[in-house]
Structures are given as C-alpha cells and as structure tokens.
Image (cartoon, rainbow, N blue to C red):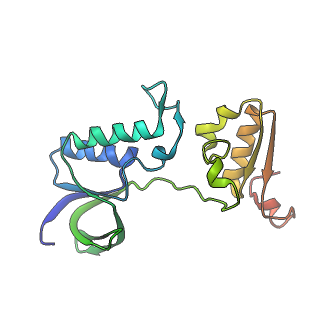
C-alpha cells in the first residue's frame, strides 16, 4: 500500500471511462476500480440518444467504452467493489474487495466516484422478464418509445411526478401509482404536486 496514486476512479460506465481516458492523457498514475464496465447502459436494449451514434445497443456502447478506455492501458481492478474510503492526512485510503473475496488497498491523492445510478426495482412478478420490453427505469431515455401508448409511473416524490408529467406529453394516457394516500399532510407523496 506504500505506492501513492494520483487518482482512483470508482466505476467504469460513461463517466468513469471518460475520467480514465483523461487521466491517461494527463499521464496520471491511477487505477479504475469497478464491478463491471458499462454500468447500466450495458443493460439497455436499443440506444438512440447517444451523441454521435444514431443507433446502437447498450451492450455495444459498453463494449465501445471498454475498448476506448483500454486503448490507454489503464490499471483496472475489474470485479471489485469499494468497501470503504478513509481520510489519512492529505491522502485517501480506498479499500476494495472482489466478488471472490480478494482485497486490495489503494493510497491516493484524489478519488472520483463515478458509480452512476441504479434503479430501484419493485420486485414484482414479471418485472425482470419485461425489463426493456415495457418495463423501463428512465423516462428521459425511454419515454419516446411509448408515444401514443398508455403508460404508468410507479414511485413517489418529485422525480416520479416529473416522470409522469413528461410521459403525459408523449403517451396517450399517463398513470401515476404511489404508496402514499392522498392527504393534505403528504400531498400524495409529492411535495410539489397539486
């Protein structure tokens, strides 16, 4: 652990791969710690909203991320997740562990956390089977696929409300399902809802 890195990047989807490319170009001593390469985009079916690429698949885009990043020969701890980060004076100690239990410890000046987003699944029958075939987790990404169709947003808070409102402009009918009862105290779970 005595070796000092300039940078540790956690995650290797779009942001993490971009950070890796720029770190290589700056000739920094760095490593990427990631469970996988591509993140959530690798789980996407059709991708039609990536600048410069009119149509591709999520897995192809993830493969392109990996190919571009690896063209700079970065140090990658693939299959590792970060367990904790500790401050040690002006440096950070990053503890990583693989799926098989192998442990690695890094000492670094800087940490970039590029772990992205992970949708909260409902864990209801049929959800996994229909993922990408009617069940999606990104209104901005997938909303246009449901033009003139009946849609349902399940959730609470302003994000769910904004999702349903966005879909109401695209779909023929938009439903919003929440676990909250409609009351003055909770406003149906939507602070900005009316």
The residue under the point 60% across, 59% down is: 120
Give percent across and percent down for residue 192: 75, 53
The residue under the point 21% across, 39% down is: 71
Looking at the picture, tell me which residue is in the foreground, 121 or 49: 121
The quadrant the N terminus occupies is bottom left
- Vertical arrangement, residue 171 with respect to residue 113, above or below: above
Looking at the picture, tell me which residue is in the foreground, 95 or 92: 95
- In terms of image quadrants, where is residue 10? bottom left
- In terms of image quadrants, where is residue 62? top left
Q: Would residue 122 be found to the left or right of residue 13 on screen?
A: right
Looking at the picture, tell me which residue is in the foreground, 104 or 182: 104
Give percent across and percent down for residue 112: 33, 56
Q: Would residue 30 be found to the left or right of residue 101 on screen?
A: left
The residue under the point 77% across, 30% down is: 148
The residue under the point 36% across, 40% down is: 63
- In terms of image quadrants, where is residue 179? bottom right
In this view, the residue farthest toward the right is 183
């Amino acid at each position: 652990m005595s070796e000092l890195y300039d940078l540790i990047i956690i995650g290797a989807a779009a942001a993490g791969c971009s950070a890796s490319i720029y770190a290589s170009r700056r000739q920094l001593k760095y490593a990427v710690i990631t469970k996988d390469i591509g993140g959530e985009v690798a789980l996407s079916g059709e991708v039609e909203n990536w600048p410069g690429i009119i149509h591709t698949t999520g897995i192809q885009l993830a493969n392109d991320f990996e190919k571009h990043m690896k063209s700079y020969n970065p140090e990658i701890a693939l299959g590792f997740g970060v367990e904790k980060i500790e401050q040690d004076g002006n440096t950070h100690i990053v503890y990583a562990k693989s799926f098989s239990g192998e442990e690695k410890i890094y000492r670094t000046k800087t940490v970039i956390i590029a772990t992205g987003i992970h949708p909260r699944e409902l864990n209801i029958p049929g959800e996994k089977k229909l993922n990408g075939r009617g069940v999606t987790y990104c209104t901005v990404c997938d909303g246009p696929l449901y033009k003139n169709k009946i849609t349902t947003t399940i959730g609470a808070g302003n994000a769910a409300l904004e999702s349903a409102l966005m879909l109401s402009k695209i779909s023929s009918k938009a439903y919003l399902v929440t676990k909250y009862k409609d009351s003055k105290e909770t406003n149906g779970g939507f602070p900005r809802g009316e």
